Image: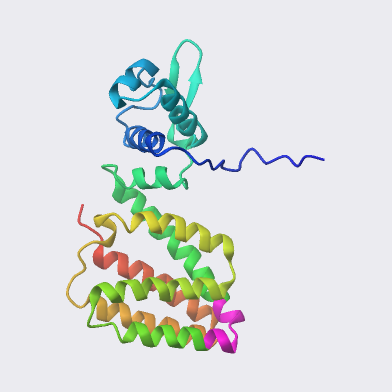
Amino acid sequence: MVQQVPTSMQVTRNRPALAEAVIRALVQDVVTEKYAPGTALPSAAALCETFTVSRTVIREALTALAEKGLVAARQGWGTVVLDRESWGLLDPMVLEAIFQREDSLLFMDQLIGIRTALEGLMASSAARQITDDARADLARQFEVLSGSLDEPERYEDEDIAFHALVHRISGNEFARAIISSIQGKARLVAQYTGAPPQGHMELTHEEHRHIFEAVVGGDTEASAELMRAHISRSWARRRPKK
């Protein structure tokens, strides 16, 4: 018996580099609203001329955009851009383009809200089920984190590793996947990393210390509260001014 794949699942294909480049450019144009929702994309012939590619490449690109929920074929209209409600917002290319929009700060604020909720949940779960081996792993990572305070770039990497370890200890695979997917793209944007004020890293490290102590101590409520406060305060310190 053939097992059917749920229609909600994303289809992953290995596409030629040329097609990938065209797809990325069109995703950027749609998400940043060079082509507004409800309007039609240029004709296949016009797109072929714009990108200097064959109709086969353009067909492949339009198929990819449809899979991402960005466009749909409409008889008599051509390929029409869909409203944002249809977009596959967790698709890597769509995410990357979202953070290039003029209103990207709005989406970053939403990301922080998601992080606050999910990472608080994961910190609580990590504290509830932490094992002796996991305590030792987290202690080692916190020691490495502490040892990189004089190296801002290294500290940022170890900061990510510290959070990732808490996520892993929590055992919440869905929350881990969501945070990893969204934050991975956001960190590529200068607005998200921001320009933290003097003393930001020291404050951040003190917050990490409290989270570490709560998690290894098995305090579920404090772990959740401290993680939520840390994420909110860190963003407030580095968030760009409107």
Report the residue at 28% width, 79% height from top. Answer: 203
Q: Residue at x 33, y 49 (%)?
A: 106
Q: Is residue 90 above or below residue 33?
A: below
Q: Where is residue 17 in the image (x, y as percent from the top left)?
A: 39, 39
In the image as oriented, which residue stretches furthest toward the right?
1
Residue 233 placement, left or right of 168: left
Residue 194 visible at all: yes
Going by the picture, which residue comes out furthest to the top?
76
Residue 92 placed where, x, y %?
Answer: 43, 48
| Left or right for 135, reference 184 | right
Taking the image as drawn, is residue 81 in sight? no
Drawn side of residue 131 relative to residue 23, left or right: right
- Residue 96, position as x, y percentages in the image: 36, 47
Magenta span dominant secondary structure: helix
Q: Nearer the viewer, residue 88 or 38?
A: 88
Left or right of 133 in this view: 52: left
User: How many numbered marks appear?
Assistant: 0
Q: Which segment is the magenta one?
A: 126-135
